[in-house]
Amino acid sequence: MNRIDYLFQTKKERVLSIYVTAGFPNLEDTLPVMEAIQAAGADIIELGIPYSDPIADGPTIQESNTQALENGMSIKTLFSQLLGFRAKIHVPVILMGYLNPIMQFGVVEFCKKCKQVGIDGLILPDLPMSQYLEEYKALFEEYGLFISFLISPQTSEKRIREVDEHSSGFIYMVSSHAITGAKSAISKEQEVYFERVAGMNLNHPRLIGFGISDAATFQLASRYSQGAIIGSALIKHIAYSLDLNKDIHAFIKGVLTPE
Amino acid sequence: MIQVDEKGFYGKFGGAYIPEMLYPNVEELRENWEALVASPSYQEEFQQLLRDFVGRPTPLYFAARLSETFGAKIYLKREDLCHTGAHKVNNTVGQIILAKKLGKKRIIAETGAGQHGVATATVCALMGMDCTIYMGELDIKRQRPNVERMRILGAKVVPAVSGSKTLKDATNEAMRAWIADPVGTHYIIGSVVGPHPYPEMVARFQSVISEEIKWQLKAKEGRENPDLVIACVGGGSNAAGAFYHYYNEPAVRLIAAEAAGLGIHSGKSAATSVLGTPGILHGSKTLVMQTEDGQVIEPHSISAGLDYPGIGPVHAHLHAVGRAEFVGVEDEDAMKAGILLSRTEGIIPAIETAHAIHALNQITFNPNDLIVINLSGRGDKDLETYIQWGNY
Ligand SMILES: Cc1ncc(COP(=O)(O)O)c(C=O)c1O
């Protein structure tokens, strides 16, 4: 069974997924950062493949992308770093990336490598669902790769049902009209949207992402879904870290400790 | 047949590779634009503005001394005489009426050199719409007069400080701003790039260029089709407009002049048809200048309007099927062609446009050939570049 399905079967609430850019803050930090995230109690690791033009992301994640690229990160390097990572990491690991670098690497080769190293799923924000169904669905399934599509407050009910039909693992629920970036509070309007989607009885669990940054927002998001995804807030926290292990632990413990 | 399909593809290129957060915005446009543009009330307003505000039809001018110089019969399509000094305004007029009909309150746009920004700020002032222009921080420094023009017109100019701080980053920022306000905002993209339906929509608004060339040439020469049409290509909107009604007239040669910068293989170039490989940029599959790892490369051209690491999907297709001939024109040659046109015809062209003029030196044609060059813009905005180059 895919690790993502297994996770959601055994844990129904307060699932914490942590996004971090691969090769950040330093090229060789990928694995140590993943280990620290797992040890601190996160349930899913979402590894970002850095890209020069990440249009769905805010300044914090874009800067971490730029930094990782300057560090020399590439898909090739990432897979060489990930070789054998399953000896240490048992939580589900998802690769998040824009389509262009993956296309240049070769989508088939990419899927092969994912399976070979032990990746469970993908988030590809600029791959439209229609294109996925036409070109990639069979391929991803062949290599056992789950895919999470995104929904936002503007997504129609009909479209949400389509996303539910074609996603595997979980649905990525974007919290607001926004790009990624740590915001401080969650508005009433957002809660109405969370509640509306929660009431739709979807087949897949939902994780809420974008703007989740601390214990309070994590707790609130978890009230309306199975959990949440945090990216920018952690990246900000470790950008200049002198002790990654300690800082990641402190951050994640902080998020997981109810206020 | 050169034609866009249902999903926005021209052959292998095009489509809408966008984050789900943009899906409702793009879908709203896709579902509505064609019917809206075809409606009588739209057409009435559009035609009236093109005529009375933009100054259309623009002349098709027989360039006698230029013809003599090159040994062919050369006409210039005078888009430089459009209000604001370039073809860009054809598209912004078209889109702002659309935005109004869709009930949008606010307009955003990206700009490189500032020409599209000025054309957008102009129509926003005309319609009393709130206007925000995203512009690379570096470009803001390089294109000061256009920044001030936009401000005089009441637009807010927001610097794009991410990535390479130029046009591609300004486009990223505009897309992000659109994600942040999907309901009230319309994004006026400035060229035949971006996710479907933008490339075809912008081309349609610019197609007035070749529509006019056809009847003007008929009146002057007794034939609708020239032997060659030449246009410069940044994103490709003026070229798409000049080629549009000739796409499927195989006897008409289509010549696309790209910016070769300091030389196609110098590492300082924007010749996408040669240096680009299939990839995804700003929501469409097209030719993209990129590294082996798929990271987008910052191009170079002396003309800011051609300084873009991709080309519109329709041009990638025209290139792939051999329908258009692409020529790479270097900085120095474009500048010389700008001076040549100034001296032979009394027209100082935009440096983008000067690339199209120089293409005459890089292609072969027959002495009796009838050539139309799309004079996409005037050189006022480029005075500083001409002065710095200094070789006149
Ligand atoms: C005068 C002029 N010509 C050409 C261009 C290039 O754009 P496009 O290729 O979309 O026509 C620009 C862009 O700013 C321009 O100002």
Image (cartoon, coloured by chain):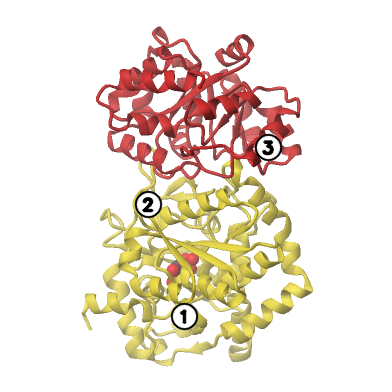
Vertical position of residue A238 compared to residue B291: above or below = above
Could you tell me residue A128's position as x and y percent?
61, 39
Chain coloured yellow here: B
* Residue indicated by mark 3: A193
- Does the beta carbon at disc 1 come under 8 Å from ligand 1? yes
> Could you give the CA–CA distance between mark 2 and mark 1, rounded to whole angstroms?
30 Å
Q: Residue at x 53, y 37 (%)?
A: A185
* Residue indicated by mark 1: B85
Mark 2: which secondary structure? helix
Disc 1 and disc 3 in contact, CB within 8 angstroms? no
The colour one sees for chain A in the rendered image is red
Residue nearest the observer in this picture, A100 or B49: B49
Could you tell me residue A197's position as x and y percent?
71, 32
Q: Splitting the image into 4 quarters, where does residue B66 fall?
A: bottom left
Could you tell me residue B145's position as x and y percent?
36, 75
Residue nearest the observer in this picture, B359 or A134: A134
Mark 1: which secondary structure? helix
> Could you give the CA–CA distance between mark 1 and mark 3, rounded to whole angstroms?
46 Å
> Which three-letter amino acid code belongs to the residue tagged 1?
Gly
Pointer 3 local density, CA inside 10 Å: few below 14, some 14–19, many at least 20: some
Vertical position of residue B122 compared to residue B197: above or below = below
Mark yes or no: residue A62 visible.
yes
